[in-house]
Amino acid sequence: MKIITVQFNYRNTMFERLLTAFRNSINLHMPDVGLTEYVYDFDKTKTNLNRCYSVVTNTFKLDRWVEILENEKENICFSDCDMLMTNRIDDVWNYKFDIAYTYRRKWKELKQGIPY
């Protein structure tokens, strides 16, 4: 199993701290699982000004996930870097599925934080 995160090259932001916490949580709970980080520069000036910035960046990220998925041969878990692992997650591969998402029952909405 491999965990993959895609993020943008935001320097000196909370995302650097979140990524560090994410790495540490994987090392603590799943030290045998690899983390692959893809970091992209994102030029805001080249975005469609009719769209919200977060919509444009999330679309870019999802496009990268598709590219990565098409070239991977092993089980992968995509994760945003603002997530924390609180346990092992590799037991998910015991279930039959093509794509799975985590969601928060409390809010009754789909979150894309951890798709497998």
Image (cartoon, helix red, strand yellow):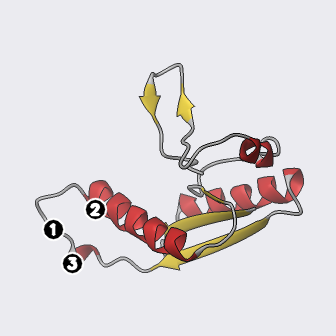
Instruction: Check residue 109 in the rendering and tell me which mark sits there, or answer none.
Output: none
First reached walking from the N terminus: tag 3 or tag 2:
3
Q: Which residue is mark 1?
A: 48
Whether residues under marks 1 and 2 lie with C-beta atoms below 8 angstroms apart, the answer is yes
Mark 3, Cα crowd under 10 Å, few <14 / some 14-19 / many 20+, is: few
- What amino acid type should be assigned to the residue bearing mark 2? Val
Q: Can see residue 31?
A: yes
Residue placed under numbered mark 3 in the picture: 46
Identified at 88% across, 61% down, the residue is 31
Q: Which amino acid does the dot numbered 3 rest on? A: Lys
Q: Amino acid at mark 1?
A: Asn
Q: Residues within 10 Å of mark 1 (few under 14, many from 20)?
A: few
Where, by quadrant of the figure, is residue 72 drawn? bottom right
The alpha-carbon separation of the residues under discs 1 and 2 comes to 8 Å
Disc 3 is placed on an element classified as helix
x and y percentages locating residue 37 in the rendered image:
62, 73
